Amino acid sequence: MNGKSGGPTTFEEWRQHHYEIEKKYARQILETPKGSDQRRQVFQQAYSDVIGNIIENYNPGGGETNYTDTVVGIVKSLLSPSRKHTATIFDLGCGSGNLLMALAKDGYNVYGIDVSQASIAQAKQDLSRFAISDHVEHGDFLDYDPPAKFDVIVMDNVIEHLVPDETPDILAKCYEMLAQDGYLVVLTPHSFSGPHDVSRYFLPFGSKAEGFHLKEFSFTDMNEFLLDAGFQEVWGFPFHPRLLGKYHLTPKPSEWAARKSMMLEKVAQLGPFPKLLRLGRMSARMVTALAFPTVAVGVKRLGETSSKDAGRPLHTKPQ
């Protein structure tokens, strides 16, 4: 690896540099006023620097998830085959468009947005062969003007990067952008086995993330956020869909699985479970993937009274 004069040259030096830069930007982002131009500028600069100038130098492609097939399977499981050529899918935080390209090849109408200008440039170039490249945009999601209602919105490893004071607004906008019986699919690393950002290489297991994971979630956290955003139902999975990824099988999401996850999260904080989770990251990730994966589906049911308006959620929030 070739670094600039006086800059990092080895993989370890690049990783340390990455950690320090993410910590610096994370502090700046959290200190800026909500909705301010200052925050937007810092956020944009942060991802431009880290993705374009750091990750792509020592770990090309390392800023994106590597289980696109799993997410495609989830999206397809929510939509009937007859809707393939009419369904519209929006990827919030689409990166260089891997998910959108896979769905476009299968005939779905795809749209996306990302804060990284370099990633969107790549997405436009790659998608031009399969879809309308102008359907992906660089910008701030809260400024996005949707051209239509969407059948599915995906947030794949995005919610943990949102500034906590803006998360409710972003989820509420997702709800408004969905068509009747639309779905918001949220995948995120579980807080029980964190930190999951670059902090994991430098902080003890169980520490609070210091980099771009501004908040890491449990399933119970996500359930509460989705209900507060207006979703009438929240579905979970009996285990993480990635576990069957190599077999190209997708478990069915349900309200039962959501209740199971929240119940087991309560149990996991009692008795022998905390000791098991403290054995290490790998054991903790396996337990969470099997028992309470942080993969949630918010369901929009127009014509029904939302849990927020009714004063009680379909899934009771923990007291």
Image: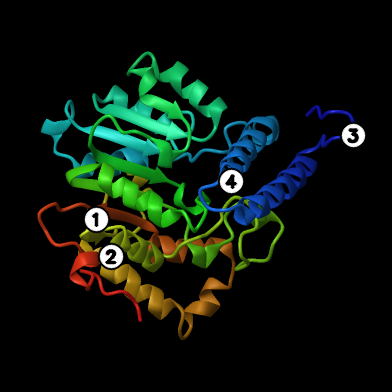
Judging by the rendered image, the residue that carries numbered circle 2 is 258
Give the mark, 1 or 3, whose residue is nearer the N terminus.
3
Q: Residues within 10 Å of mark 4 (few under 14, many from 20)?
A: some
Label 4 is placed on what type of residue? Arg
- Residue that appears at 72% across and 57% down: 202
Q: In the drawing, what numbered circle is on residue 6?
A: 3
**Residue 308 appears at what percent x and percent y?**
24, 66
Label 2 is placed on what type of residue? Ala
The residue lying toward the viewer, choosing from 210 and 35, is: 35
Judging by the rendered image, the residue that carries numbered circle 4 is 39
Q: Are marks 1 and 2 in contact (CB under 8 Å)?
A: yes
Label 3 is placed on what type of residue? Gly
Q: Is residue 46 left or right of residue 138?
A: right
The residue lying toward the viewer, choosing from 204 and 297, is: 297
Label 1 is placed on what type of residue? Pro
The residue lying toward the viewer, choosing from 284 and 99, is: 99
